[in-house]
Image (cartoon, rainbow, N blue to C red):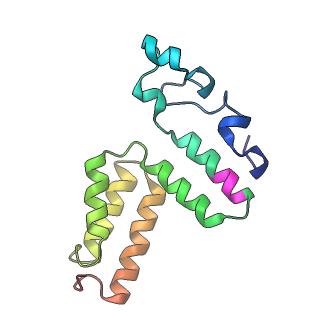
Amino acid sequence: MSFTRHDYPLAEHHPDRMKGKRGKPLSELTLDAVLSGAVTIEDLRITPAALQAQADVARSAGRPRLADNFLRAADLVDVPQDVIMEVYELLRPGRARNREQLREAAATMRDVHKAPRIADFIEEAADVYERRGLFSKRF
């Protein structure tokens, strides 16, 4: 079932459907559960499903770009932080040497990290950077 703008805020309208990485619903994330050790940091981490739900809400509200951002964020949930930072650095104008370097980063995101939307985004950036001469221009 997808969500609509009428389901927002999801945590209030569907607390049992919003779950952390270990599958605990929000309704079980209580102070007592934290104090007893039944809730860990993994229970508080965002999940791809939660971001997909937010994308559904955004799209339903007529915010397709925001929805796309949520979907790209869902791709990144399980990507290691160091990989995210390496790609971020490459995407800064003048950091990547050429289009191929960004295409390689996109292939890694797609094939190794199963992040197809991020890979598409990086490939689009590679094309734009080439058109605008941003491989050699550093700000």
The vertical placement of 111 against 25, above or below, is below
The vertical placement of 53 against 136, above or below, is above
Q: Is residue 113 magenta?
A: no
Judge left or right: residue 27 versus residue 94.
right
Range of residues picked out in magenta: 55-59
The vertical placement of 88 against 99, above or below, is above
On the rendered image, what quadrant is the C terminus found in?
A: bottom left
User: Image quarter for residue 132?
Assistant: bottom left
x 40%, y 55%: residue: 110
x 29%, y 84%: residue: 134
x 71%, y 46%: residue: 8
Judging depth in this view, the residue of 94 and 107 nearest the camera is 94
Magenta: main secondary structure: helix
Judging depth in this view, the residue of 34 and 6 nearest the camera is 34
The vertical placement of 88 against 23, above or below, is below
x 62%, y 33%: residue: 18
User: Image quarter for residue 40?
Assistant: top left
Q: Where does the image place residue 48, in percent across and percent down from the top left? A: 52, 42
Q: Where does the image place residue 82, in percent across and percent down from the top left? A: 25, 49
Judge left or right: residue 18 versus residue 72.
right
Judging depth in this view, the residue of 39 and 78 nearest the camera is 39
Direction bottom: furthest residue: 132
User: Image quarter for residue 105?
Assistant: bottom left
Q: Where does the image place residue 100, in percent across and percent down from the top left? A: 27, 73
